Image: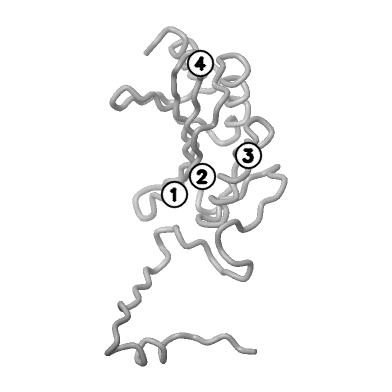
Amino acid sequence: MKNHLQTAVDLIQKKYNGELSSFRGHITLLIKSEFILEVCQILRDDFSFEVLVDETVVDYWRRKEPRFQVVYQLHSRQHDERIFLRTPISEDDPNTSSLVSIYPNANWYEREIWDLFGIRFEGHPDLRRLLLPKGWEGHPLRKDVPIKVEETRFTFNNDEIDRGKPRAEN
């Protein structure tokens, strides 16, 4: 770790009891959900991690509780460093704080996460579906959602596939 990144990690570990892990040179801190907003604010304002590169979710269905972890990747252009933050999210209460006030581009990431995983972001200005139609029920990237496979369409099975499809009513 470089000196700048080490200072940031030390501060966050001490103040917020963050768990540190490292893999192939990438530093990851596990931060409790209630501190994620503060930690990101400090990283942006005091340590120049001004870019939210990515925000996504890992679903640990059937493996452990808390079921989800929201993963944030931050980048400091000034120091050319990256840090990953993970915050555990319970299946019973799937919500955390929105980062839109700190990183405006979190808006679309969080809408996508809500749409596909069903995790709510407190304080998000417009949390609604982004990719799926308004009437869609559920969150399809959760691992407990059954996989639906459609047979490949060929000339010999066109009619059979069409019979199995629901049709829109006028």
- Labelled disc at residue 97: 3
- Labelled disc at residue 87: none
Q: 34 or 53, which lies in front?
A: 53
Closer mark to the observer between disc 4 and disc 3: 3
Q: Element type at marker 2?
A: strand
- Measure the C-alpha gap from mark 4 to mark 3: 21 Å
Of labels 2 and 3, earlier in sequence is 2
Q: What sort of colour scheme is used for the picture?
A: one colour
Q: 96 or 41, which lies in front?
A: 41
Of labels 1 and 3, earlier in sequence is 1
- Labelled disc at residue 89: 2
Instruction: Examine the rendered structure and indicate whether residue 150 appears above or below residue 145.
Output: below
The N terminus: image quadrant: top left
Of labels 4 and 3, earlier in sequence is 4
Picture residue at 50% right of the left edge, 16% below the top? 14
The C terminus: image quadrant: bottom right
> Whole-percent x and y of residue 154?
29, 83
Picture residue at 55% right of the left edge, 56% below the top? 118
Marks 2 and 1 close (CB-CB < 8 Å): yes
Spot the residue most to the front. 155
Closer mark to the observer between disc 2 and disc 3: 3
For label 3, the crowd category at 10 Å Cα-Cα, with few meaning under 14, some 14 to 19 and many 20 or more, is: some
Q: Which residue is mark 1?
A: 67
Identify the image quadrant of residue 131.
bottom right
Hey, what amino acid is under mark 3?
Ser
Marks 4 and 1 close (CB-CB < 8 Å): no
- Measure the C-alpha gap from mark 2 to mark 4: 22 Å
Instruction: Examine the rendered structure and indicate whether residue 97 appears above or below residue 64.
Output: above
Hey, what amino acid is under mark 2?
Ile
